[in-house]
Amino acid sequence: MVRVDGSGTSSLIQVRGLDKKYSRGGEEIHVLQGLNLDVDQGDFVAFMGPSGSGKTTLLNLLGGLDVPTAGSITVAGDAITSMSRGALTTWRARHVGFVFQMYNLIPVLTAFQNVELPLLLTSLSKSERRKHVETALGVVGLSDRMQHFPRQLSGGQEQRVTIARAIVSDPTFLLCDEPTGDLDRKSADEIMQLVLTLVKDYKKTVLMVTHDPVVAEKADITLHLDKGALVESGKLAGAMAGGAR
Amino acid sequence: MKYARLLFANLFRKKIRLTLTLASFFTALLLFGGLAAVKSAFNAGVDVAGVDRLVVINRVSLIQPVPISYEDRIKQIKGVKYVTHQNWFGGIYKDPKNFFPQFAVEVGSFRQVFPEFKIPEDQWQTFVKDRQGAIVGAGLAKRFGFKVGDRLPIQGTILPGTWEFNIDGICTGKDASQESQMWFQYDYFKEKVGGSYKDMVGWYTLRVDNPDESGRIAKVIDDQFSNSSYETKTSTEKAFAIGFAKQFGNIGALVLIVGSVVFFILLLVTGNSMAVSVRERTPEVAVLKAVGYSDTLVLWFVMAESLIIAVAGGMAGLLAAVGLIKIVAIMGNLGGMLPSISVSGSQLALGVCAAVAVGLASGLLPALGAMRLRVVDGLRRV
């Protein structure tokens, strides 16, 4: 169950009093202010909000790509906000799968080689790595495109390779930053169907940033970032209606 | 090895840039190899110079002779063990391009001063008894197919006329430069030149009992002949050889300056190439870090790329230099002028080290940049 009031006690992801400030051109921007969040294993959460509201910042903090100004993030018992840069890197390799809007595949590597990248950091043998990669590409329906380079794939196929790369090492949770933002509706629907399969069939925990309400609808819950804090979709609508009165 | 595919995929990403960068290293190391070979060829005499040998020449210049009467006076100086003398002949064998050094030597003392020359005793004895006899170095014999018993006509240049010699022996020395020479009897030389020149020699070479005494002995010799018509200049054989090589210019300094400039430019070119290459891949570097590649691993990827280019291009350039020097030596007939011209193992090793150093230095800044890159900053540059 997803909570934003900081009342969770044994959640997979626990965020408490998260603050993030940026200094830009001498001006201090307070992006996140005392944000709380609890996400359980198998939850599918969508984050929405206007540009600059801090969605990607939140995702970066949850993925250990950035450090907060204040507050704490604990994932499966690991307090990642107190980890060193090197320890965070190791932690990311084990626990986080990233899916980016622009796919971010390495153009000189085939789909197979791109998906294999996270596994090179493990002690798996070559044959074990092959088995894992083939399984991941099978899950995303690209078994017949393994030796294709990114330029030989459509946008939707590239994003599926990215998802395969994200799941190949069986991470604790997936962070998706506008995974359908660069796709047409049909491809976006296919990607969302794939994400739902990962959540339902493979019990993956997914946290996704999106601008698209149609995509957000697929999630178990949609949280809006408002004034640096998270608000549930229904409550935000109520607050806005109240404000209008 | 599991990262090799990623490494080489990145290397071959921009083939034209890779080719040009490799070509930069190739050209620089080709030049380095060539210059190093020329330098060592000019310094060949320095390398074989005896530590216990001094050379006495005319103070004015090497080409001015000194009287033969000096020999006995030099012998009497305390600490002098053996003395011999030589004259440069400078003749031509059939064609000027067949150049090789010829010296008139004193047979009685030559081997005492130059014990490194090895020759079968029977051949030496034949030479001693044959006024028109000559000894040729093994390299020279091989070059022209000379055999013991051959008749060898040499056209004089400084001393005109055709000089006939009998090849009585073939000797070996310390290196190719020593084995590319010809020696004949001073008595034959003296007999043919006649006039005032017959009582003159080109220079003296002497061996001393104790090399530590060389400085003192040199001073005694030069003091003894000061204020005479033929003042002398005495130096160690090594200093003499260096001075001889410097007649052609300061090859060592030239090699150093040209080499330094070339490597500095190479550093700038490769550094720029690597910086552009890494900057283009900033988002990919960020993704690698996002999925768990450590800062150190990313640093080594960039360094390894730079190093592979440096070593591959550099070694190709050095190997080309070795081949080219051989071809030029044969085609350009440098065997007589610069018999020792070749790229030595130590020079090859130095070249590889220089390439590695430039490779590491040029990759360092881009590698540090990639290492320090924050993932969030890198991803923003998509």
Image (cartoon, coloured by chain):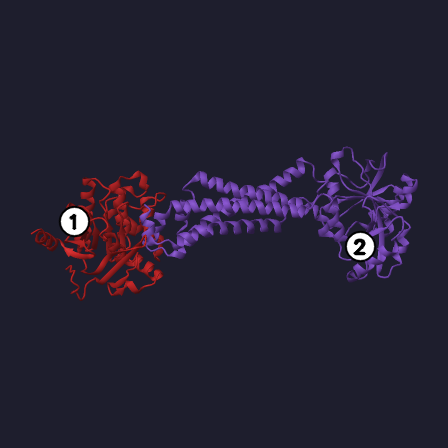
Q: Of residues B228 and B157, which is closer to you in this image?
A: B228
Q: In which chain is the residue bearing label 2? A: B
State which quarter of the image contains the N terminus of chain A: bottom left
Residue found farthest to the left: A245
Mark number for residue B54? 2
- Amino acid bearing label 1: Ala
Q: Quadrant of residue B65?
A: top right
Q: Residue at x 46, y 44 (%)?
A: B273
Residue found farthest to the top: B95
- Amino acid bearing label 2: Leu
- Can the viewer see residue B301? yes
| Element type where label 2 sits in the image | strand
Image side of residue A172 versus residue A237, left or right: right
Q: Residue at x 47, y 48 (%)?
A: B306
Chain red in the figure, letter: A
- Can the viewer see residue B1? no
Image side of residue A231 versus residue B191, left or right: left
Mark number for residue A74? none
Image side of residue B96 versus residue B285, left or right: right
Q: Mark 2 to mark 1: distance in Å?
A: 94 Å
Q: Which residue is mark 1?
A: A216
**Label 1, residues with CA under 10 Å away: few <14, some 14-19, many ≥20:** many
Chain purple in the figure, letter: B
Whole-percent x, y for residue B368 in the image? 43, 54
Which marked residue is nearer to the observer: mark 2 or mark 1? 1
Q: Of residues B240 and A132, which is closer to you in this image?
A: B240
**Label 2, residues with CA under 10 Å away: few <14, some 14-19, many ≥20:** many
Whole-percent x, y for residue B156 in the image? 83, 36
The vertical placement of A64 against B277, above or below, is below
Q: Residue at x 26, y 41 (%)?
A: A155
Q: Of residues B71 and A177, which is closer to you in this image?
A: A177
